[in-house]
Amino acid sequence: MPVNFLSEEQRANYGSYPVELTKETLARYFHLDDFDRLNISEKRGEHNRLGFAILLCTVRYLGKFPESMASVPDTVIECLAQQLHTENINNAIDLYHSG
């Protein structure tokens, strides 16, 4: 017997970022610990480090990879870029897309 656990709205939004993320959510799911930083530091180039961090934290938060980088909220990208000391965020994202 099939059971519906999710409402229509929940099904439609499953695997998507909400419109707004709280500071608590950013701190819980998008904080890079020492182990994360070690793995990220092995990536070559600022753009790959930021891209990898975005993928890592998106999987941690949503349970899946983002459909595209455009679907990742700016607050997430800025939060991770700040932790990684990424100087030119837009350039890093563009390079990651093209690479």
Image: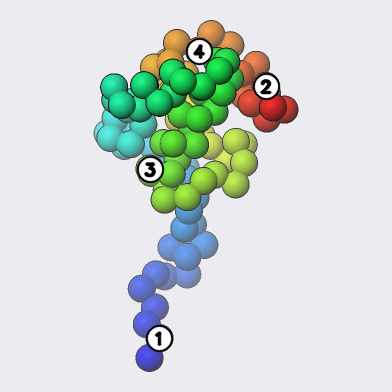
User: For the residue carrying disc 4, how many other residues have a C-alpha within 10 Å: few (<14), some (14-19), or many (20+)?
Assistant: some
Q: Which of 10 and 52 is in front in this view?
A: 52
Residue 20 lies left or right of residue 89; in this view the side is left
Tell me which amino acid carries mark 2: Leu
The residue beneath circle 3 is 60
Mark 1 to mark 3 CA distance (whole Å): 28 Å
Q: Which one is earlier in the sequence, the residue at label 1 or at label 3?
A: 1
Q: Nearer the viewer, residue 75 or 41?
A: 41
User: Residue 53: image x %, image y %?
Assistant: 46, 29
Tell me which amino acid carries mark 4: Thr
User: Residue 56: image x %, image y %?
Assistant: 44, 36
User: For the residue carrying disc 2, how many other residues have a C-alpha within 10 Å: few (<14), some (14-19), or many (20+)?
Assistant: some
Q: Nearer the viewer, residue 61 or 11?
A: 61
Secondary structure at badge 4 equals loop
Q: Mark 2 vs mark 1: give the one in front.
A: 2
Mark 2 to mark 3 CA distance (whole Å): 23 Å
Mark 4 to mark 2 CA distance (whole Å): 13 Å
Q: Which one is earlier in the sequence, the residue at label 3 or at label 4?
A: 3
The residue beneath circle 1 is 2
The residue beneath circle 2 is 95
Secondary structure at badge 2 equals helix
Q: Which one is earlier in the sequence, the residue at label 4 or at label 1?
A: 1
Residue at the (36%, 21%) spot, across then down: 38
Secondary structure at badge 1 equals loop
